[in-house]
Image (cartoon, rainbow, N blue to C red):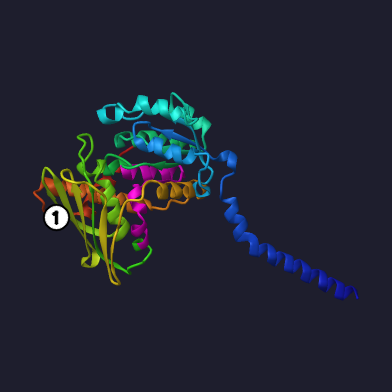
Amino acid sequence: MDSALNRRNFMEKAALAGFGLSLAPQVLSFASARPRDEKRVGIIGLDTSHSLAFTKAFNATDAASDLGGYKVVAAYPHGSKDIPSSVERIPGYTEEIQTLGVEIVDSISSLLEKVNVVLLETNDGRLHLEQALEVFKSGKTVFIDKPISASLVDAIAIFEAAKKYNVPVFSSSSLRYMENAVAVRNGKIGKVMGADTFSPATLEPTHPDLFWYGIHGVETLYTLMGTGCETVQRTHTEGADVVVGTWGGGRIGTFRGTRSGKSGYGGRAFGEEGILDMGSYGGYRPLLVEIAKFFDSGKAPVSAEETIEIFAFMQAADESKKINGHAVSLQAVLDKGRREAAQISI
C-alpha cells in the first residue's frame, strides 16, 4: 500500500512539474515585459516633429495596448545647434510638449535619473554619438531616430559602444514599416529579385546628401532587398538622384530621391512569385509599436549589420557622385569606415 501511495505521489508531482514546464514559455514572455512603473520614457531633442508626434501617441488617454503602456515623462530640448530649420522649432515644441504632461529638464544626466528608456530624437545626426554614449553609460535601452548619425564612421561607433556597454539599441525610419514592405519582407512574393523605391531627398549642408532625408527611401529599399549590396552607382542632378545598387546574384535595387516636382514615398518589389507596389505611407504608428516591443524585450527588430550597411550604401553613393557616377565597392567603403571607427574612443 505504501508503495502504491508513493508511486501516486510521484506521478502527481511529475504531472505538476510537467504542467509547470508547459507554462514556462508563457511565464517567461510575461516576465520579459517591464512592470508598469518602469515604462517612463525620456526624449532627447525637441527639434523635430517626431518628438511631439511620438509623445502624443504614447501619452494619449486612449493609447492602444500595443503601445505597451509607455509614457513620455521628461524631455531634454537640445537638439540641433546650428541647423536653422531645426533650432527654430525648439521653443515652440518645448512649450507644446509640456501641455502633454512632460517635464523639461536641463541636461541628459537629469533626464536619465527620471526615465527607464530613451527616445533619442535630436534631428542633427552629428550629435548622436555623443548623446548616445551618455545614455549607454547609464545602461538604459534607447531608440535612435533617423539618421542614426551624420557619418558611417559614427554609425559604426554607436553600435560598437552599445555592444561595449551591453545596451539594446536600434534605429529605423518609419518607412520600413509600410504594410506592403513588411509583407514583402515576410515572403509574400517569394525571393525578391529587385526593387525600386523613392522618397524626398532634400539636402542639408551639415550631412552627407542622402543621410538627411533620402534615408527614408533607402531604408525602404533595404527592407525589400535585405543586406548584401556589392556596388553602388549614383546619378545626380539638382532636382533628383538615382542610386543603383547591385546585390549578390545579380539582383538590382534602385532608389530615386526627389527635390523637385511632386514628392512622396513608395516603391515596387519584384519577386519570384509576384510584383507588389508599396502603396501609401501609413504614418508613425507601426514604428511606435515596434519601439514599444523593443523597450519590453530589449531585442532590436533591425540588426546593427543592416543599419550599418544602409549607411555604407549612402556613403558609397556620395563617393560615386564624386567620381561622376562610376561604381563604388560597398565593401571597400565599409572597411574604411570600420578602420576609422576603431580610432574613436568610446
Q: Position of residue 180 (x, y in %)?
A: 34, 59
| In this picture, residue 224 sits left or right of residue 77 | left
Q: Is residue 165 magenta?
A: yes
Q: Residue at x 32, y 43 (%)?
A: 155
Q: Quadrant of the N terminus?
A: bottom right
Instruction: Answer with the quarter of the image where residue 108 lies.
Output: top left
Q: Residue at x 84, y 71 (%)?
A: 6
| In this picture, residue 108 sits left or right of residue 149 | right
Magenta span: chief secondary structure: helix
Question: In the image, what residue type sits under mark 1?
Answer: Ala
Given residues 178 and 42, the one toward you in this image is 178
Given residues 87 and 141, the one toward you in this image is 87
Q: Residue at x 37, y 31 (%)?
A: 46
Q: Quadrant of the C terminus?
A: top left
Residue annotated with mark 1: 327
Instruction: Please report the bounds of the magenta region as a residue range.
Output: 155-183
Q: Position of residue 19 (x, y in %)?
A: 69, 65
